[in-house]
Image (cartoon, rainbow, N blue to C red):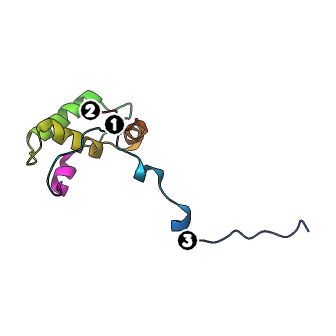
Amino acid sequence: MGDREVEPVRRPMTDSYEPQHLNQPSCIAFQPNINGNMNLSCKLLNTLLHFSGDLNENPHLHIKDFFDICKMQSIQGLTPKQMRLILFPFLLKSNAKLWMNSLDAGSIHS
């Protein structure tokens, strides 16, 4: 009786995997008040430098570079501060992205 192996139930991956973070509210409290859709160009997103939070990275230099890049950009209907709030999540990766995703919803206002 104990020698029989139980075969696992086979099912599509989509039935067993639903990422938790897709429905997680953003930690950034700002919601743009823009009519229609806002388009961020790939060129703009590729200009942004990534920050992963590694010990050898200087967060102050990274923020300075981010502000310098943002000064050269404009999105109609947004103040510079609002634009930085929208772009900031696109800068982060690895540990820095995990940290930001762990923050409470609406905890970042500026």
For image coordinates 40% across by 43% down, the residue present is 94
Specify whether 66 is left or right of 25: left
Mark 2 residue type: His
For image coordinates 29% across by 30% down, the residue present is 59
Is the C terminus in the top left, top right, bottom left or bottom right quadrant? top left
Q: Is residue 83 above or below residue 11?
A: above
Q: Is residue 63 above or below residue 31?
A: above
**Residue matched to label 2:** 109
- Asked which secondary structure carries label 1, the reply is loop
Residue neighbourhood size for the residue with mark 1, other residues' Cα within 10 Å, grouped as few (<14), some (14–19), many (≥20): few
Residues drawn in magenta: 36-48
Mark 1 residue type: Gly
Name the mark on residue 106.
1
Q: Quadrant of residue 69?
A: top left
For image coordinates 19% across by 37% down, the residue present is 66
Q: Position of residue 49 (x, y in %)?
A: 24, 43
